[in-house]
Image (tube, grey):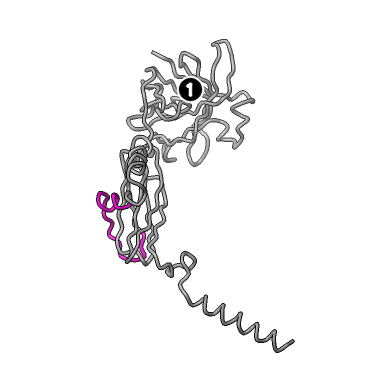
Amino acid sequence: MKRYIYKLFVVLLTTSMLFSCSEEEGTEPGNDPNPAVTIFKYEPGESYNVDNDIVLRFAFNNKTTAAYFLAEKSIDKEAYINTSGESAYLDYVVENGEALNVDGESDLDTTLVGLYGEYTITVVAVGENSKFSSETTFTGLDWSDVVSGTYTFFNADEIGIASSSTMLQICTTNEKLYRFKDVFGEGYHLKINLLELTGEDSGGAYTFFRVPNTKTPLSYGDYGSIYVRDIGYWQGNDSFVTSSGYESGMYSDYNCFIMVQYYVGAGSLGYGYDEFTVD
């Protein structure tokens, strides 16, 4: 019995050694016999517009000898595939996409700007006898004017600005997302996200909304940039803006009261009600 067990152990060990020395597709870095690519997405730097610009990193394996990428409206890609098929689309990317300077294992970064609507970014990695594709999507925000008005800041002395003429806009792809355009200066907007929650006061019925953390171009002495956010984000507790009396609201005529905190890295510059009054 011991002799049979020993022979079985030798067979299993030999088999294991044989498999460990062979190329295992997709399991060991550098050992995949086919080309491959992985896509990573990052927000661009401050000089870019995060609503419509994006940084992409393409990570290729060592079997990649050439690569191409194409960014186009998702609806256009779907139409091509419905007509010609997935395989033909890879050839389409190779023929019409941008060639990447890649030869073997490497990471390449590229920045795409000015994307409005939903885009699909497709990358094709080409090897000796095969192709491999990977894709990701990005929806660039576009905006439509709703109503013009005046935005009034509650703490003008601290932030250095009393009021601003602005346009309230709605996102064309998200009916709950609004922004006060250029309210802190050109290119510096304040976004608000409407909630499925309503209230009523002496001004009438209103819809609750959130104010995410936003960097402004303003500064406070030697303390650097001024930021703004609602009280819920400040306290790390959503209930502050839904049931604790620190809510922000939009009336049916688009007038708004905005309960926010302004702050710098060293601390708070106070909190109170900003106001948006429709012209």
Seen from the viewer's position, the closer of residues 32 and 115 is: 32
> What is the x, y in percent for residue 119?
36, 40
Residue that appears at 53% across and 28% down: 271
Query: For residue 277: magenta?
Result: no
**Where, quadrant-wise, is the N terminus in this rendering?**
bottom right
Q: Amino acid at mark 1?
A: Asp
140 up-or-down from 162: above or below: below
> What is the x, y in percent for residue 23?
45, 72
> What is the x, y in percent for residue 47?
33, 42
**Where, quadrant-wise, is the C terminus in this rendering?**
top left
Seen from the viewer's position, the closer of residues 91 and 276 is: 91
Relative horizontal placement of residue 224, taking residue 239 as reference (left or right): left
Magenta span: 90-107
189 up-or-down from 121: above or below: above
179 up-or-down from 44: above or below: above
Residue that appears at 52% across and 76% down: 20
Figure label count: 1
194 up-or-down from 113: above or below: above
Residue farthest to the right, as pictured: 1
Residue linked to disc 1: 274
Seen from the viewer's position, the closer of residues 204 and 89 is: 89
Say few, some or many: other residues with alpha carbon within 10 Å of mark 1 (under 14 / 14 to 19 / 20 or more): some
Quarter assignment of residue 73: top left
Residue farthest to the bottom, as pictured: 3
Query: For residue 94: magenta?
Result: yes
> What is the x, y in percent for residue 246?
59, 25
Quarter assignment of residue 277: top left
Residue that appears at 32% across and 30% down: 186
Q: Name the secondary structure under disc 1.
A: strand
Seen from the viewer's position, the closer of residues 40 and 271 is: 40
